[in-house]
Amino acid sequence: MRTYDLTPFYRSTVGFDRFFSLLDQAASDGSPGYPPYNIERTGENAYRISVAVSGFSQGELSIVAKENTLTIKGEKSANENVAEKAEVLYRGIAARAFERAFQLADFVQVKNASLENGLLHVDLVREIPEAKKPRSIPIASGAQAPQVVDASVAA
């Protein structure tokens, strides 16, 4: 079984390492290697998951994003296998049903999905709300510091 080292991503994604930690956990939990997939960084806050789904049509695939979990399912229709007229001598192209789940980091949204050339591409974007973004606080010098007002009453 292949293992993937995500250490280089930890160095280049300060503040986003939880995303790769979750992906690393998902890959190491003994989940099967079918179907194979790639995770690419396409921009500063944009990512793409590409899943090899050759042999599946658009109607046989489903993508569900619920809370912080992205689930991709593929299920071949039973009628297609019965309707085959040719006798298959060797089946090297897997057409079995699958379910692949990905844990997404906070504020990661699924933008769109496309199926082209046997690859299912799911585009993700990390959109941090304005309230959660860091903001710069100006530092006042001693001359601009607020004056202390003495509120004592002169008698």
Image: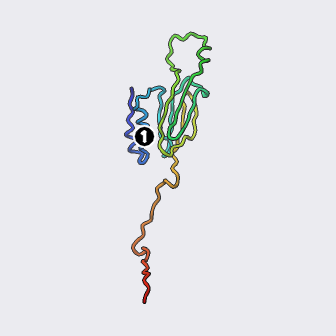
* Quadrant of the rendered image containing residue 112: top right
Q: Position of residue 12 (x, y in %)?
A: 41, 45
Q: Amino acid at mark 1?
A: Phe
Q: Position of residue 121 (x, y in %)?
A: 54, 34
On screen, 123 above or below 74? below
* Quadrant of the rendered image containing residue 83: top right
Q: Residues within 10 Å of mark 1 (few under 14, many from 20)?
A: some
Residue at image position (43%, 88%) is 154
Q: Which residue in the rendered view is the most extreme toward the bottom?
A: 155
**Where the N terminus falls, by quadrant?**
top left
Residue at image position (44%, 37%) is 23
**Where the C terminus falls, by quadrant?**
bottom left
Q: Position of residue 103 (x, y in %)?
A: 47, 38
Residue at image position (42%, 81%) is 150
Q: Position of residue 151 (x, y in %)?
A: 44, 81
On screen, 70 above or below 35? below
Q: Is residue 80 found left or right of 140 in the rendered image?
A: right
Which structural element holds mark 1?
A: helix
Residue at image position (40%, 28%) is 30
Identify the colour scheme used.
Answer: rainbow
Q: Is residue 48 found left or right of 18 in the rendered image?
A: right
Residue to which mark 1 is pinned? 20
Count the marks: 1
